[in-house]
Image (tube, grey):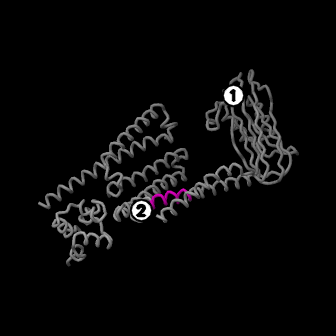
Amino acid sequence: MKNAKIGIIIPAIIFLILLFCIPLIFLYKSPQDESVQKWKNRITVTDGKVDQDKTTADFTVNKAGEITLYFSFLPVGVEKDDVSNVDINKIGCLTTVVVENEKGEIEYTSTAGSVFLDTTMYLEAGNYTVTYYYHSDAEAFREFANEYLCSQRATEEIIKETGFENFEKNATTDFIYELKVYSAKADRTHTGVILLWALCIGISFGALIGGLFKYSDAPDGKYRYDERQRTEQGRGYRAAFIATAISLLIPLILGSTGIIGSEFMTFVIILALFIGVSVLIVYWIWHECYFAINENSTRIMIFIGIFGVLNFIISVINFIGGYLIVNCVPTVRCLNLFVALLSLEIFIAILARRAANARLEAQEGEDEE
Amino acid sequence: MKNLKLKAARAALDLSQQDLADKIGVSRQTINAIEKGDYNPTINLCRSICKALGKTLDEIFWEEE
């Protein structure tokens, strides 16, 4: 019992301490100044002409180094995730962001209809100006580009891709602008601190779960499961681990070669977890090494059946509503479908095990006679 | 390989797999797996089985050439 207490209480205390320390991450201050500016601006296009040429904002770099600039100009009501769906034709103008230093030298440019992006570059200490230039027709943009953009070829490509001729001639759009300036080094340190905390929390959580499993299974030094069951459980874990690793590695390798797009990665991770859990449960059922499933199989079958049907109904609703597959990519909602499939698998595995046991018992009965 | 000696010794005492399993504190499936030859028990479990059946290790687990 003493071991059991140590095995559970110590990881639990560490886990709780780390859990309460999480808010400290948010109190973590960057050693470098971070400036954030946010403002609104209405852009009106009348008869194909924008009511203003540009909008400007200034920022200061206190110490020379790697600086990250975060730009965002999105129409009101558009979230960052939906930026690709913004229709530039309805806005009626194209925006170019230009960052200049005190001497008027261009440090950075980017052209888009609406955007959020961050870029890291080396900047000397000093004052900088960010200017947002607006263009509603190709000719005006070409003139502007001759002055600010180096490559004529790139300019022509932008003009071709933008399709100025399709722009609305009369449009009003309210934009929200955001400009964030911070030290890239501080940002990396901040990310490192978060990763370190995540690692500590992960380890202590693993220790807690491990302690709970180990000592709840052997409250008085005696295991609830006998030696064969524990051996088979271990083999099940091994099989599940290998299955999960293979299911993850193959798509990751295919993803790195570009055969599978990165948009499928959420689906791939869920699929790999599903395969791992499936292998584990089916292995345990077939080798009869888990009391909860094998000793109360009828009750488990009823519960799993209801659970599976409910998840299947949710999947069908999601499919009909168009949430299951968006733009030909399965979303995280496919989890319900996987749970339904897993329930079906468990159901079939228990039935198969029961049928095999019945056959063996009948055979033994004949042998004894 | 099936352990018919174990099965015979159990049957001689009129014990079911479940009865023997309860006596030595393992699951019925484990006794079944040992009898079918699907599982090789540890020496501790072999000793418990022999004690429960009143047999020696040789009588239950020794295979004649």
Q: In this rendering, would A194 be left or right of A316?
A: right
Name which of mark 2 and mark 1 comes first in the sequence: 1
Q: Main secondary structure of the magenta part?
A: helix
For residue A69, which quarter of the picture? Answer: top right
Q: Relative to the observer, which residue lies in front, A194 or A333?
A: A194
Q: In this rendering, would A111 be left or right of A361?
A: right
Residue to which mark 2 is pinned: A218
| Residue A124, horizontal then vertical, whole percent | 83, 52
Element carrying mark 2: loop
In whole angstroms, how far apart are the C-alphas of marks 2 and 1?
Answer: 67 Å
Q: In this rendering, would B53 be left or right of A249?
A: left
The amino acid pointed to by label 1 is Ile
Q: Residues within 10 Å of mark 2 (few under 14, many from 20)?
A: some
| Residue A89, horizontal then vertical, whole percent | 66, 28
Please name which of the two marks, 2 or 1, marks the residue nearer to the observer: 2
Q: Verify whether residue A302 appears in magenta.
A: no
Q: Chain of mark 2?
A: A
The amino acid pointed to by label 2 is Ala
| Residue A17, horizontal then vertical, whole percent | 61, 55
Report the number of numbered marks.
2
Q: In this rendering, would A351 be left or right of A169?
A: left
Marks 2/1 in contact by CB < 8 Å: the verdict is: no
| Residue A323, horizontal then vertical, whole percent | 50, 35
The residue at 28%/48% (across/down) is A351
For residue A106, which quarter of the picture? Answer: top right
Residue to which mark 1 is pinned: A91
From the viewer's perspective, is residue A8 above or below residue A92?
below
